[in-house]
Amino acid sequence: MSKSGRGRFGARKMMLVVPGVVLMTGLSACASAPPKTDVADYQAYEAVNDPLEPTNREFYKVNDTLDTYVMKPVAEGYVDVTNQTIRNHVGDFVSNIGEPARTVNFILEGMPRDACVSLMRFIVNSSFGIGGIFDLAKHMHLPETDTDFGITLAIWGLPAGPYLYLPVFGPSGARDVWNLPYEYFATPMELAPASAALSDFGYAETGLHLINTRAELLDTIDQIKATALDPYATFRSLYRQSRASEVVQVYEAEGRTPPTWAMPPSN
């Protein structure tokens, strides 16, 4: 097996075992639930739905240290040598790579119209938008609608489950954690023959995605850390609110008015 093949096989195994390892590790350090006789405390414990909080907070500390000394300085340097237009194009490029995964998710969610729009976006932007650097599809009334495998599972009726804070990856949940292996396998790069150049491209794309995303959140994260009494709890709350909103948006997406070119001619 080639070096690039071994690297890809190792990454596959890692993405498959990450969810299970995280869940098993967390179960070894669960927060003790208060007795049900303490009604108020027990209701608060259930509402938080963070039984792995001791482990989650340790992972948060690790991530926060990495962010403080690595990710944030790199993102600040990235902002210094780029402008918002460049960062927007980087975001469009990364988003285009994820379009095939969104297409499949929309099919699994029973939303054929959004699946067609997502597929057309990928074809148009990959062909004429220089690999997605330019989002030409939006000018053709093909708007981007986001979804992922966690949202697909939500639409299938799977509950969110307990909150998880993953090392490196950050906020997640028992349902959303399965989005990690799904998105890894559902990229266009996985369909191409293994090669060293393809592996290097994958690493570069992932790194650029992380840095570009962190750069867009510089002010937001700084403000939360500066003002929140418990940043961990604040990030947990914001993540849950965001995920709940994204699920609702996908539920409602198929009911949008279709673009004029997709409407049947009037009699």
Image (cartoon, rainbow, N blue to C red):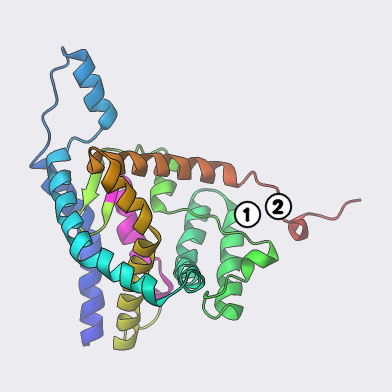
On screen, 261 above or below 152? below
Crowd band around label 2 with a 10 angstrom C-alpha radius: few (<14), some (14–19), many (20+): few
Q: Residue furthest right?
A: 267
Identity, as a three-letter code, of the amino acid under mark 1: Arg
**Residue drawn at point x = 38 percent, y = 70 percent:** 79
Q: At which x and y percent is residue 58?
A: 12, 48
User: Which residue is found at the position 64% from the left and 43% from the top?
Assistant: 255
| Magenta stretch, overall SS | helix
Q: Measuring from the top left, give residue 90's x and y in whole percent.
A: 45, 72
Residue 200, quarter of the rendered image: bottom left
Q: Nearest the camera: 64 or 92?
A: 64
Q: Secondary structure at mark 2?
A: loop
Choose top left, top right, bottom left or bottom right for residue 44.
top left
Taking the view exactly as shown, the residue that stands out farthest to the left is: 28
Q: Is residue 99 left or right of residue 127?
A: left
Q: Which residue is mark 1?
A: 113
Assess disc 1: are there few (<14), some (14-19) or many (≥20) residues with their C-alpha within 10 Å of its C-alpha.
some
Q: At numbered mark 1, what does the secondary structure look like: helix, strand or loop?
A: helix
**Residue 173 vs residue 146: left or right?**
left
Q: Determine if residue 156 is in view.
A: no
Report the span colored magenta.
171-190
The stretch drawn in magenta includes residue 232: no
Figure check: 52 above or below 258: above
Q: Is residue 197 visible?
A: yes
Instruction: Specify whether residue 172 is painted magenta.
Output: yes
Look at mark 2 in the image and give the residue it sits on: 258
Type of amino acid under label 2:
Pro
Q: Assess whether mark 1 and mark 2 are in contact (beta carbons under 8 angstroms).
A: yes
Residue at screen point 29% across, 40% down: 234
Between residues 209 and 183, which one lies in front from this camera angle? 209
The image shows residue 10 at horizontal and vertical percentages of 20, 72
Can you tell which mark lies on residue 133?
none
